[in-house]
Image (tube, grey):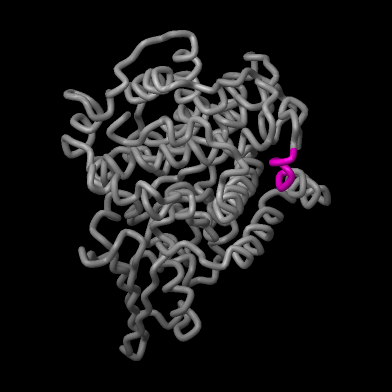
Amino acid sequence: MDHIESWNRYRNLRYQALPERVKTVAGQCVLDWFACAIAGSEEPLSGILRAEFEHRHGACTVIGAELKVDALTAALLNGSAGHALDFDDTSASIGCHATAPVFPAALALAEELGASGERLMTAFVVGVEVEGRVGNGLGPEHYGKGWHTTSTLGVFGAAAAAAHLLGFDDRQFGMAIGLAASQASGLKANFGTMTKPFHAGHAAERGLLAARLAARGFTANADAVAANQGLAQAAGTGSLNIAKLAHIADRWLIEDSLFKYHAACYLTHAAIESTLRLRTRVSAADLSAVTVTVNPALLDVCAIMAPRTGLEGKFSLTGTTAMAFLGIDTADQANFVDAIVQREDVQSLLGKIRIETDASLSNMQARVMCVDRHQRCHDEAYDAGIPATDLDAQRQKLDQKFLNLSQGHYGARASQVRDRIDALPSVRDLSEFAI
């Protein structure tokens, strides 16, 4: 772990020492995660997981359910629910859903320990920072090989957050990271299925388990990420990108958080935004042909050409583009269901959309060009990879998103629940926290 970041930087970090912008972004990440977990708790996959694990009684909250379980199970269930809609935040610097595997692990352990809200929020930030540094060290080739980074990187973030709450020294932290390295897993082949959100829950649970075992004296190779036959060799380019790690050494990576305002894979958002701009000039009925141009890496992530289910639609550039042209609100997660995706007009428009690639585009950029029935060309481009500079405006959007996602569960109480989440840093004992 010395190759990635010294634990000394984070071991004694306290909430008061965090920059105000970091505190603000962290709070927005947490609010957004709760919104996604509340709505995600009503997804079929969450019900299946609760049915399988509800016998594991304990003191920790399961979001959206009248159920208390042990900390490991809470991390698994809440982590999966928070990623169930694929509507949670992502990161501009490492390309994974940074909060989804880290916060549920920290929340479960903080609740079990009766830690304060300040300790929880600090541990969460530490987890995201460590997660991001592992990701930057491994580089984008790791994701390109087929690994789901939300899971493979998230297990380190979850372990680091738990290590901070448990007050680990360097040796204990090294053991937790080494053990986490052997549990890093998750394949992009499972995108578009229930297994993708399970990855986030699994990473939260495994990271928390790694820290708990390390606290008991369990041993591992502290250098299992960078060592010979370690993670960088097995799932990366062979060695860590030390120059990149040095370049980001003084940055707070949590500030690179990107929030979703469309309930689909973030790599479809640039195309959706481009399409929405085109739709002001060209109606779906007038379309003759549509070309969506993206980085070739997206073909391995969100290029399900003929989606038939709601989950497949979330990972389909053609599907989301068709929905946007037809005026189907992609910001409403209720529209990503089988009945909508299978609509005759959606399926018909899919046949007019083709995907092209351009390696000069980043993963977060897209160009959409359409030809109308008069053979006139129209085009738009968008970059979805730029973090917001106006955090107040971002907060207003997240407030509305929270209410949209939580009112189905909490009704008129949704705003009160939001206020309780906002007040997390002031909570003295998380064992008494409930929403």
Q: Is residue 87 left or right of residue 308?
A: right
For the point 33% across and 72% down, the residue is 367
| Vertical order, 320 against 337 (above or below) | below
Count of numbered marks? 0
| Vertical order, 365 against 280 (above or below) | above
For the point 41% across and 44% down, the residue is 192
- Along the line of sight, which residue is nearer the eye, 264 or 130? 130
Q: Which residues are magenta?
A: 421-426
Residue 181 lies, in percent from the top left, at 33, 25
For the point 55% across and 22% down, the residue is 166
The furthest residue to the right: 412
Q: Is residue 313 visible?
A: no
| Vertical order, 303 against 145 (above or below) | below
Quadrant location, the C terminus: top right
Residue 323 lies, in percent from the top left, at 48, 65
For the point 43% across and 53% down, the residue is 265
- Along the line of sight, which residue is nearer the eye, 286 or 333? 333
